[in-house]
Amino acid sequence: MKPAPFEYLRPASVDEACEALASDPDARVLAGGQTLVPMLAMRLSRPSILVDITRLADLQGITETAEGIEIAAATRQAVALKSDLIARQVPLLAAALPNVGHPPTRARGTVGGSIAHGDPSAEIALAATILNARIVYIEDGEEVEFEPEDFFIGPTVTMAPMGGLMTRVIFPKKPAGRVGAGFHEIASRRSDYAFASAGAQVVLDDDGACVQALLGIGSVGDVPVAVDVSDLAGTRLTDDDLKGAIEAALADLDCVDDLHATATYRARAAKRLAFQALATARENAA
Amino acid sequence: MKTDLTVNGRTYGIDVEPRTTLLDALRDGCGLKGTHAGCEHGVCGACTVIVDGEAVRSCLMLAVQSDGLDITTIEGVAPERGELDVIQDSFCETHGMQCGYCTPGMVLAAKALLGVNREPTDEEIRDAISGNICRCTGYGQIVEAIRLAAKRLRESNALAMEAGE
C-alpha cells in the first residue's frame, strides 16, 4: 500500500458531500482519481478524508440550456468525447478531448476534475480558457462562478474555494456563422503531458472572411493562456495572415524551462502549434 | 471497510483499508495474481482491467470505489479453464509477447476495444493501447495480434452470439 491512510466517504447527495468537505480542511474531493490517486501513491497528497462524488447523479451529464452547454463536474471524459452535443456545440472542446490522456484514463477521469486540478498542460482547461467557459462551485450553500482567467493562478494552484465543490462547467455555445476548431499538441509520447499545446476557433462569414478568431496556448507556462488574435477579423486567414497574427500575439509568451524542454523550444513549438491549430480551424470552417 | 468486489462473475466480500487500490485488492484480497503491478501510479498500464465494459487502470482506483462494479481480469477472459481466449491465442500466434509482463494489460485493453469496435484500424488499435507500455516485444507484433484477433472474431460467430444477433 503506497498512500498514507485516509478515510473514505461516498455521500448520497451533493449537500452531504459539501458538508463533509466544509467540515474538515484536509478533506479532498475524489472524482476520477486519475491524478489524485498517483499523488496519493507518491504521498504528494495526504488528505484526511476522500469524498467520492463519482456516483452522485446530480454531478453527471451534459445538457443544453439557454446559457450554454453545461457539463456536470463528475462527467467522465470518455462520455464527453462521445457526446454529440459537445461535437455540435463546442467543437473546440471536441477537438481537445482526444488528446486528454488515453482510453483507460478517460474512462475514469472527469471533466471537472481536470479543471479543478489546474495542470497547465490540461487540454480541457485550455479549451475552457480560450472559450471563456464558466466554472461553477458551491461554497457555503451558495453558487460561485469563476472565469478561467481568474481561476487558474499557477501550476495546480487555483482559486477554488476551500471546502467548496465544483458542480458544473458552462461552455458557451458556438456562435452563428461557419465555425471551425483545431487543437494540436506535442508530447514525448501519446497521452503524456504536452510540452506545448494550442487550440483555436475561427468564425467565417458566408463570404469566407474571418469574423472572429480565438487562440490559446497551454503547457508552456504556469497556466493556460488565451492570446489576442483579434486582428485576424476581416482577413481571409491566409497563411501569411496567420503567421503575422501569431508573431504579434506570442511575442511576450511566458515559457518555462524544465527537464523535458527549454523555454526557447517551448516558445518555438507554441508558434508552430498555434499555426497548425488556426489552419485546422480554418479548414474545418470552410 | 467491507467491500464487495464482483470479479469475473464471482463476488468476493473483502475487508480493506480505504487506501487499498483495486490492484492490491485483486492480487491480495481475491488472490488473482494475473493482474500485474508495474509502476503502481498510472503510467505503465500493466494493471489494466475492465470495469463496467471499459479498460481502466486498477492502480488508479481504490478498492472501495469499485464496490458493486462489474470487473473483468485476465483470469476471466478465457472461456474455460485451460483454454485461451481468441485475443490470447492471437498474441501467442503473432509472438505478441516476450516477457509477458505487459500482456494481461494489453489483452484487456484489446478486449475493451474489440467489445465496441469489430473492425478497428491500426490507428484505433494504437490508440487503444497507447496507455500500455511494453519494454521488450515491440508494439508491431502486439498491434498485429489485436488485428488478427479482430479478424478472427469477425469471421467466427462468437461475437455475433455475444451481441445477441
Image (spheres, coloured by chain):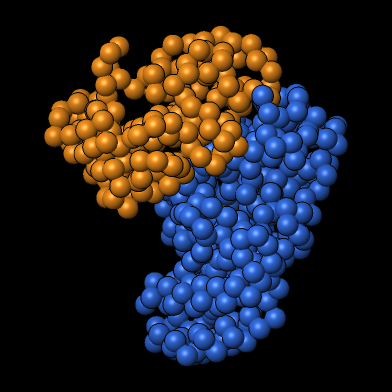
Chain colours: A blue, B orange
- In the displayed structure, does residue A190 sit left or right of residue A171? left
- In the displayed structure, does residue B33 sit left or right of residue A71? left
**Residue A67 placed where, x, y %?**
61, 59
**Residue A46 placed where, x, y %?**
78, 34
- Displayed quadrant of residue A256: bottom right
Q: Give the residue drawn at x 57%, y 77%.
A: A268
- In the displayed structure, does residue A140 sit left or right of residue A170? right
Which residue is nearer to you in this view: A130 or A26? A26
Picture mark count: 0
Q: Is residue B151 above or below residue B51?
A: below
**Residue A249 placed where, x, y %?**
63, 82
Q: Give the residue drawn at x 56%, y 24%.
A: B22
Quadrant, the N terminus of chain A: top right
**Residue B5 placed where, x, y %?**
52, 16
- Residue A68 visible, this angle: no
Q: Is residue A68 above or below residue B28?
A: below
Determine the residue located farthest toward the top in the rendered image.
B13
Which residue is nearer to you in this view: A122 or B88? B88
- Residue A96 visible, this angle: yes
Quadrant, the C terminus of chain A: bottom left
Q: Give the residue drawn at x 83%, y 35%.
A: A26
Q: Is residue A226 above or below residue B140?
A: below
- Displayed quadrant of residue A53: top right
Which residue is nearer to you in this view: A161 or B72? B72
Q: Give the residue drawn at x 40%, y 85%.
A: A208
